[in-house]
Image (spheres, rainbow, N blue to C red):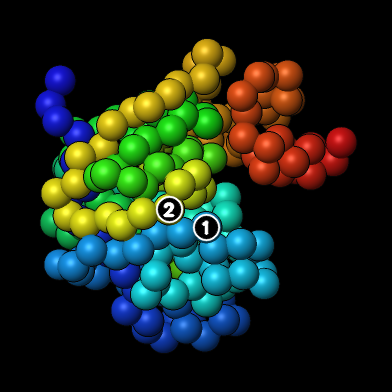
Amino acid sequence: MSRATVLQVNLAVPEKSDAKNVGTTGINKQPVDHPVAVRAPGPKRTGLHSGLVGDQIFDIEHHGGDDQAVYAYAREDYDWWEQQLGRELRGGLFGENLTTEGLDVNGAILGETWRIGDELVLQTTFGRIPCATFQWKMGEPRWVKRFGAERRPGAYLRVVQPGDVRAGDEVRILDRPAHGVTIGDSYHAWLHDAGRLREYLELDGLPEGLRADIRRKLRL
């Protein structure tokens, strides 16, 4: 198996957007060549929003907060999308903070932990749900539906232990819950299989934020 690494660390370069009423979006992420501090941002609407110092989130109703502190997307999945769309896709285009290489992000188990570099520890929480801003950024017809049909959402992560991250850092998996439910499978269940989603509530090791989100979605 190839060594898993952070290929790019990406921070927002704000731009105007007509997709939502927020007016400005931070989905435009560009790579930086310096270490970036990562810490827990706190509550979604009242905290620091992004887990990366120097990053910005504007749609604070739907993005950011402790359970979406960091967003990771695999270069391998970009390569797959390039074949599907017939165009080049640069790292950061999907709005991820970490573009990875050699890591099966969508095959990660819900609640597994990663050590990145010497100190930073992150825990997977869920996949990224596509939104109108993402479709606007991509300029692809029916992008929300097309992205939602594939089990390649990338992973949101919460900060277990703060630390710095930089391009080239190794990613090591520290722990995997025994339930075996992946980011890709749970994302598919969220969008397409409410029955399976209900079963997840019985799993040991499910992130508590996700458990609460499932209950709200199913109106339990």
Above or below, 187 against 98 in this view is above
Disc 2 marks which amino acid?
Answer: Pro
- Residue 180, given in percent of the width and then of the height, sits at 50, 16
Q: Residue furthest right?
A: 220
Q: Residue at x 15, y 20 (%)?
A: 1
Locate residue 196 relative to residue 183 in the image: left or right. right
Q: Earlier in the sequence, mark 1 or mark 2?
A: 1
What residue does disc 2 label?
Answer: 162
Above or below, 220 against 62 in this view is above
Circle 1 SS class: loop
Locate residue 22 relative to residue 80 in the image: left or right. right
The quadrant the C terminus occupies is top right
**What is the number of the mark on residue 178?**
none
Q: Nearer the viewer, residue 71 or 184?
A: 71
Above or below, 132 against 54 in this view is above
Above or below, 168 against 219 in this view is below
- Residue 75, given in percent of the width and then of the height, sits at 20, 44
What residue does disc 1 label?
Answer: 40
- Residue 102, given in percent of the width and then of the height, sits at 18, 33
What is the total number of numbered labels drawn onto the structure image?
Answer: 2
Q: Residue at x 40, y 42 (%)?
A: 121
